[in-house]
Structure formats: C-alpha cells, structure tokens
Image: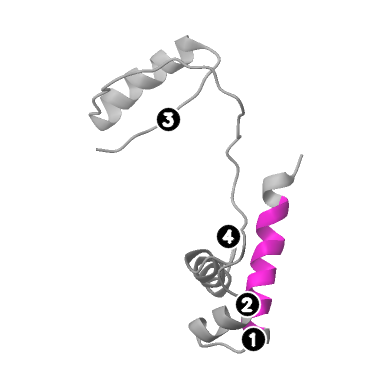
C-alpha cells in the first residue's frame, strides 16, 4: 500500500483532487486526517547530482559520516568507494555544495 500526503489550505481543492485521482488512477482513499502543521516545504526541482556525487553522498550516509559524532572519515569513505581520497572528497564536496544551499534558500 502506498501513502500520499497532501496539504492544502482549502478543503474544496482537496475534494476535487481526490475525485480526479480516484477517476484517473482507480485509487481508494482509506482515510483523511486533519491536523495542524508546524512547517511547510514547497516542492521544487532538486539539484541535479552526477552519478558519482550521488554515490559519494549515499556512501557517506550509509557509513555514518553525517552522524554526531562521525562514525567514519572521508579517508575511510574513499577506501570503501575504491577512489583516491582527493577524488572522493571532490565528489562529496561538490554534492554538498549543491544540496546544502538548496535546503536553505529563501
């Protein structure tokens, strides 16, 4: 079962959306929940990472690089990825340079 979360300030818009989704995709709505939200994120196009940048981020996350305290170092991540330290570090830094501003733009 897939879950879709949709937020709206106008219930009429949500009602129309549900009707259209049910018609177009033969969906079944199991429940609707009304709740107050603390923050909102507007969906926008994600920054485009190269395959190497994406792989570097994935390896870093998987191995606890972004945990506190860090569970590994860039040197260890480079070994895991079978790349030189400088090459892996470049892929990781370029990915971070694209992703971090994306989430903090005004």
The Cα atoms of the two marked residues, 3 and 2, are separated by 36 Å
Foreground tag (3 vs 2): 2
* Disc nearer the start of the sequence (4/2): 4
Name above or below for residue 75 compared with residue 16: below
Name above or below for residue 40 compared with residue 34: below
Mark 3 surroundings: few (<14), some (14-19) or many (≥20) residues within 10 A: few
* Disc nearer the start of the sequence (3/4): 3
* Disc nearer the start of the sequence (1/4): 4
In x, y percent, where is residue 20? 34, 22
Viewer-proximal residue, 59 or 6? 59
Q: Is residue 97 left or right of residue 68?
A: right
The Cα atoms of the two marked residues, 1 and 4, are separated by 20 Å
Mark 2 surroundings: few (<14), some (14-19) or many (≥20) residues within 10 A: some
> What residue range appears in magenta?
87-101
Give the residue at x 55% y 72%.
56
Give the residue at x 27% y 24%.
23
Residue occupied by mark 1: 85
Circle number at residue 67: 4
Viewer-proximal residue, 1 or 67? 67
């Amino acid at each position: 079962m897939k879950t879709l979360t949709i937020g709206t300030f106008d219930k009429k818009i949500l009602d129309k959306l549900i009707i259209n989704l049910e018609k177009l995709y033969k969906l079944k709505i199991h429940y609707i929940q009304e709740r107050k939200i603390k923050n909102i994120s507007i969906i926008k196009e994600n920054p485009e990472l190269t395959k190497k940048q994406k792989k570097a981020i994935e390896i870093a996350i998987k191995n606890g690089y972004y945990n506190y305290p860090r569970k590994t170092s860039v040197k260890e991540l480079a070994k895991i990825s079978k790349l030189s330290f400088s090459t892996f570090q470049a892929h990781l830094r370029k990915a971070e340079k694209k992703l971090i501003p994306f989430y903090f733009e005004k």
